[in-house]
Amino acid sequence: MGGSRASSTAYGEAVRDVRRQLAAAPQDAPPRLAKRTSNLFRFREPPAGATLDVAAFSGVLSVDPELRTADVGGMTTYEDLVAATLPHGLMPLVVPQLKTITLGGAVAGLGIESTSFRNGLPHESVLEMDILTGDGEVVLARPDNEHSDLFFGFPNSYGTLGYALRLLIELEPVRPTVALRHLRFADAAECADAITEICRRHAHGDDDAAPVDFIDGTVFGPDECYLTLGRFTEDAGPRSDYTGNRIYYRSIQDRTDDALSVRDYLWRWDTDWFWCSRALGAQHPLIRPLWPKRYLRSDVYRRIVALDRRFRFSDRLRALTRAPQQEPVIQDVEVPVDRLAEFLDFFHREVGITPIWLCPLRLRGDRRWPLYPLEPDTLYVNVGFWSAVDVRDGERVGDRNAEIERVVTALDGHKSLYSTSFYSRAEFHRLYNGEEHDQLKRRYDPRGRLPGWYDKCVRGR
């Protein structure tokens, strides 16, 4: 722990306690974290190993307004982190869309949002981490110390190299309001060209005096694509509220201009889990007013889905009504912006899910993160799609997801690993730099106490 900025007595005791828990855990099965929430979409039976109580690492240790940094427990949700930084006029450089994503989870499993075209991914604003490794040590990992290999290799490792107990991150200043413009494009190629130009200039059209601070997009069909541009403003005028009966994503088609408080903007997607709450009836005009506002949250919807997957209510209903079998297609992929139109053409033709989320991203600098090897000079677009498709004649469940993986690879893209994957071990090893992971595994988890990377991300163990 030498050199760590965290000096609280409570934090030190929490570190000693979790080390004791790991030492006492059975050796024959990987331990797992006892977390109240999860944003992973691998609905399988939990492993048989011991659980580590990490609740003590779910708070903000300090916020330094002058240095614009926050010292944060790894299990802290972004909802709590933002609540601690906004009173100082600050926010994390990237705030993933869902409130219960944890800081440690966004670094070990990646995250993205509408500032990613200028701020990259959440792990790029990390200055240092305390990581509990598989061998029971807690090491301070920085980009310039003896554990720099773990610092750079930790993102996208999904708990197979260790768990982040504390992270020191950069913050950036905010203003009270985010003003929005929704721009419509007739096709994906036109939309991709606009993304390229806006991300190059951080501005749109002739208005260089109104910088673009945020950009994401929504695709409602092959001929209906929108980019939403946001900018910070001091304007205290009327703001929209999408935390109750009004639904944010529907406003994109109905309005050209809008404004939200910075807090409501950061959580604009959480209220309806983007648009996925419609599958649970939460958007029905007769049900919406009766749905308690405090339960209009992504973690509530996910718990409902988890129960459905566990007890197979939907599958049984479909069998009773003789409806076609369905395959969940819940994925986020990154493709270079100049291949976006090609990917969306394939997706509309072979998958057909709408809406689709778009989010441009570029790495902040020339640092390389070996387990998710994006090219520093390339502008990518994250494409998110979260629904299910009917299984076609001659198909098996999983075929459509596997085809998406093949197309993404052919387009020089990458796929996030929070959901189901179908790669062979050799292909997974090649695409995600398995040799680098294996070297880190030998150094920081030599006895294999933590899950294997392929087992965790593909086989779901």
Image: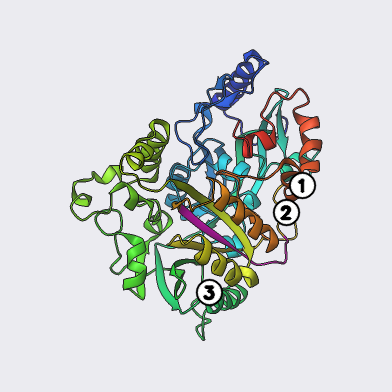
Real-space Cα separation, disc 3 to disc 2, in angstroms: 25 Å
Residue count near mark 1 (Cα–Cα under 10 Å), binned few <14, some 14–19, many ≥20? some
Residue 18 appears in which quarter of the rendering?
top right
Say whether residue 148 is magenta. Answer: no
Amino acid at pointer 3: Ala
Q: Residue at x 76, y 47 (%)?
A: 433
What residue sits right under mark 2 in the picture? 373
Magenta-drawn segment: 375-386
Tag 2 secondary structure: loop
Work out whether residue 307 or residue 319 is closer to the camera in this orientation and state it.
319
Compared with 237, 102 (above or below) is above
Tag 1 and tag 3, C-beta contact below 8 Å: no
Work out whether residue 23 or residue 168 is closer to the camera in this orientation and state it.
23
Q: Residue at x 63, y 45 (%)?
A: 422
Q: State which tag comes first along the sequence, 2 or 1.
A: 2
Amino acid at pointer 2: Pro
- The answer to whether residue 111 of the structure is visible from this angle is no
Q: Residue at x 28, y 49 (%)?
A: 282
Tag 2 and tag 1, C-beta contact below 8 Å: yes
Amino acid at pointer 1: Asn
Q: Residue at x 51, y 66 (%)?
A: 349
Compared with 262, 294 (above or below) is above
Q: Is residue 380 left or right of residue 269?
A: right
Residue count near mark 3 (Cα–Cα under 10 Å), binned few <14, some 14–19, many ≥20? many
Real-space Cα separation, disc 1 to disc 3, in angstroms: 31 Å
What residue sits right under mark 3 in the picture? 188
Real-space Cα separation, disc 2 to disc 1, in angstroms: 8 Å
What residue sits right under mark 1 in the picture? 433
Q: State which tag comes first along the sequence, 1 or 3.
A: 3
* Percent position of residue 390, x then y: 44, 52
Residue 452 appears in which quarter of the rendering?
top right
